[in-house]
Amino acid sequence: MAKLTAILGDITQLHVDAIVNAANSSLLGGGGVDGAIHRAAGPELFEACSKLNGCATGGVKATPGFLLPAQWVFHAVGPVWQGGEHGEDNLLANCYRRSLELAHEHQVRSIAFPAISTGVYRFPQERAARIAVDTIAKHAQASGVETVQFVCFNRETLDIYTRLLSGSIASSR
């Protein structure tokens, strides 16, 4: 069973096999986590992403990590929140599920996720965290991933993940 933890930190500094980027559909960089990852990885990341022809919402594509400590970057395109009646939950779950499929393909044992879609895409944090934890808990073992870190950008997000993970761990025993 994979070990799931939540931390407060900078995803670009983590020594894991793969980090997940909360990307936009162009994959060419943006603000928030996406911009930070592109800056830290160097210009080669932009070049690699420009050859991928973008990515649909709910999809994920892989590139090398270049200057990052992580070997891989999985670019996940989360949904923009539109009130919850436009398949947002499913699209967000697909980001986590597809990231784990890529982890399996690339023999990733440790992976770090940001809170996908909760920044400028306005997905409610609690709802997004529940989808993330449930999806990862359900699919991590089949992926071969041993360690999953949810990297939170503030204390409020960390508290949500910590509470959900303590419930998830208790219910999975």
Image (cartoon, grey):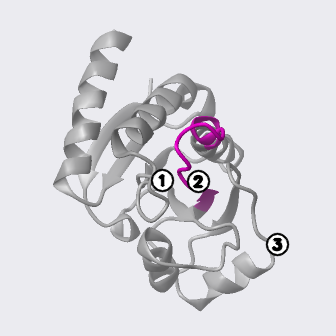
Residue 81: assigned label: none
* Rendered residue at 60%/42% (across/down): 88
Identify the amino acid type marked 1. Answer: Ile
Q: Which residue is mark 3?
A: 53
- Disc 2 on helix, strand or loop? loop
Residue 132, x across and y down, in percent: 46, 37
Quick check: marks 3 and 2 in contact, CB under 8 Å? no
The residue nearer to you, when weighing 87 against 37, is 87
Residue 157, x across and y down, in percent: 26, 49
Identify the amino acid type marked 3. Answer: Asn
Please say whether residue 89 is one of the residues in the magenta stretch. Answer: yes
The residue nearer to you, when weighing 45 against 161, is 161
The residue nearer to you, when weighing 142 against 91, is 91
- Among the two numbered marks 3 and 1 on one chain, the one whose residue lies closer to the N terminus: 3
- Disc 1 on helix, strand or loop? loop
**Could you say which quadrant of the image residue 124 lies in?**
top left
Q: Residues within 10 Å of mark 1 (few under 14, many from 20)?
A: many
As displayed, is residue 51 above or below residue 147? below
Q: What distance separates the C-alpha of mark 1 from that of mark 2? A: 6 Å
The residue nearer to you, when weighing 43 against 53, is 53
As displayed, is residue 83 above or below residue 36? above
Please say whether residue 82 is one of the residues in the magenta stretch. Answer: yes
Left or right of 128, for residue 88: right
- Among the two numbered marks 3 and 2 on one chain, the one whose residue lies closer to the N terminus: 3
As displayed, is residue 98 above or below residue 141? below
Q: Which residue is mark 1?
A: 116
Residue 12, x across and y down, in percent: 40, 70
Give the magenta-colored segment's residue range.
Answer: 74-91
Q: What distance separates the C-alpha of mark 3 from that of mark 2? A: 17 Å
